[in-house]
Amino acid sequence: LFNLKAAIADAIPKRREELLRIKKNFSDVKVGDITVGSVLTGMRGNQSMYWESTTLDPNEGIRFHGRTIADCQKMLPGAPEDNGDGEFLPESMLWLLMTGEIPTEEQSRQLTQELAERGAKLPSHTEKLLTSLPRDMHPMTQLAIALASMNKESIFAKKYEEGSIGKKDYWEYIYEDVLNLIAVLPRITGKIYSSLVNDGEPLGHFNVEKDWSYNIASLLGMTVRDSVNVHSLTKERSNDFVNLIRLYCGIHVDHEGGNVSAHTTHLVGSALSDPYLSYSSGIMGLAGPLHGLAAQEVVRFLVEMENDVDSVENVKQVEDYLWKVLNSNRVIPGYGHAVLRKPDPRFDAMLNFTEARPQEFKSNAKVQLMKNLSKIAPRVLQKHGKTKNPYPNVDSASGILFHHYGIDQLLFITVIFGCSRAMGPLSQLVWDRILGIPIERPKSLDLSSIKKLCKI
Ligand code: CMX
């Protein structure tokens, strides 16, 4: 089974049968209690969504079909040219998310090639639309617009409109849209970035022989072979950047179902909006500063703080800076989490990337500040006494590493997050349709119903 679609088709009967059996025999089993507290505080702790591929343990962090980041780094295939030395490919992760199985080298290679072929061209209307957008429109808004415009390409939407498909077949067309959407993300990303820094002129070439992350890097002008080479990276640094994209995109794919971008994609998709509309909505959620936009906010924060302190080693000044932020009722971006209660293992993975390259990062004061902060900020936040999790989340490390290699358009950074996050929620969308998960429609409560429940 070299082809991803065939591998999914192979997994379907057992999964459908399992879910059906549980639905039929165990629907009355209680999952937990919903309290007035959870109704009034963003549904915290309310276990009420089905999610196929990832789960988040408050203490241990994310697992992808039960596998930790370290497991994935050991098991998932990387790019053939790296001979086992590079990071695993996000394509390998996509296979794992979709099938629950670790792909073979051949399967990973085949999926890489399939995505490159599907992504070679951006629809001309989307390209034109992106060209026409104001240069100072936020890059995340541009991404959401580009994705929504591709609804015109949706195979699922066309088939549905024709009335030619039955419920059991929906997934096949959703799958086609999902793969086409993921495939075209390097092109959209490159186009948005070139508008910001190169007057819309391409910064690099799309290479059908190469993997998805390589093409993102190339279209950002960061590879030696295929780019116009605006950043003038050496071959070694360029390879490192490609591997940074692979690592970043490999581990940001999903964080179980309840986070804003994943939940939004799933919710909008449950109305049978096609994957382009669904993920465009997810991107709009990712663009919020308490969620994905924290990636951008952290870089801005580090840049500003570095300017403000005499030295990034000056613990007292860094603490004072943090207190100034907290006392003005702002959050410390990159810290805290709604579910996690320990340091984010995705943060550790990003940190390990820098620690494997001490020469590269040792003279970057902002990277040093990011590392120092991960020790100082938890103490300050604990003293502040509000945050349930005072530790760094993934966003506290990631953006500054892109910045280090020359991606200095701060507002752009979350777009790379948007490339990665497509993989988890859109894999779920395929399985939502396979399993016939119905339209999502929780019940809301008004104040008088809550008062009645509280007997007040
Ligand atoms: N700095 C300052 N205060 C913080 C804080 C932080 N980093 N994290 C939480 N708090 C505050 C909350 O604002 C809340 O204050 P109020 O009681 O005044 O409303 C209080 O501590 C309790 O919050 P919590 O239960 O610990 O956290 P929530 O589940 O409400 O929020 C999150 C989670 C991530 C939104 C919050 O920690 C935050 O704002 N962090 C900074 C932004 C950030 O890094 N977001 C990225 C998260 C990862 C991602 O989704 O990409």
Image (cartoon, grey):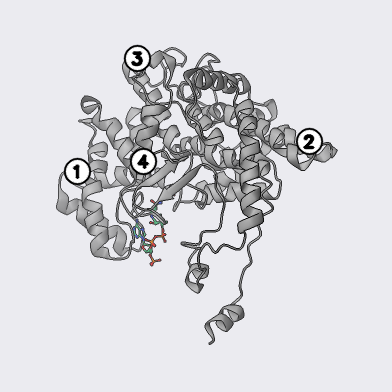
* Rendering coords of residue 67 (x, y %): 41, 38
Residue topped by disc 3: 235
Mark closer to the observer (1, 3): 3
* Rendering coords of residue 16 (x, y %): 65, 42
Above/below status of 351 relative to 35? above
Q: Earlier in the sequence, mark 1 or mark 3?
A: 3
In the picture, the disc for residue 158 is: 2
Task: Identify the amino acid type marked 3.
Answer: Lys
Ligand 1 within 8 angstroms of badge 3 C-beta: no
In the picture, the disc for residue 346 is: 4
Q: Residues within 10 Å of mark 1 (few under 14, many from 20)?
A: many
Mark closer to the observer (3, 2): 2
Q: Residue at x 20, y 30 (%)?
A: 362
Q: Earlier in the sequence, mark 2 or mark 4?
A: 2
Label 2: which secondary element: helix
Label 4: which secondary element: helix
Q: Earlier in the sequence, mark 1 or mark 4?
A: 1
Residue topped by disc 1: 312
Mark closer to the observer (1, 4): 4
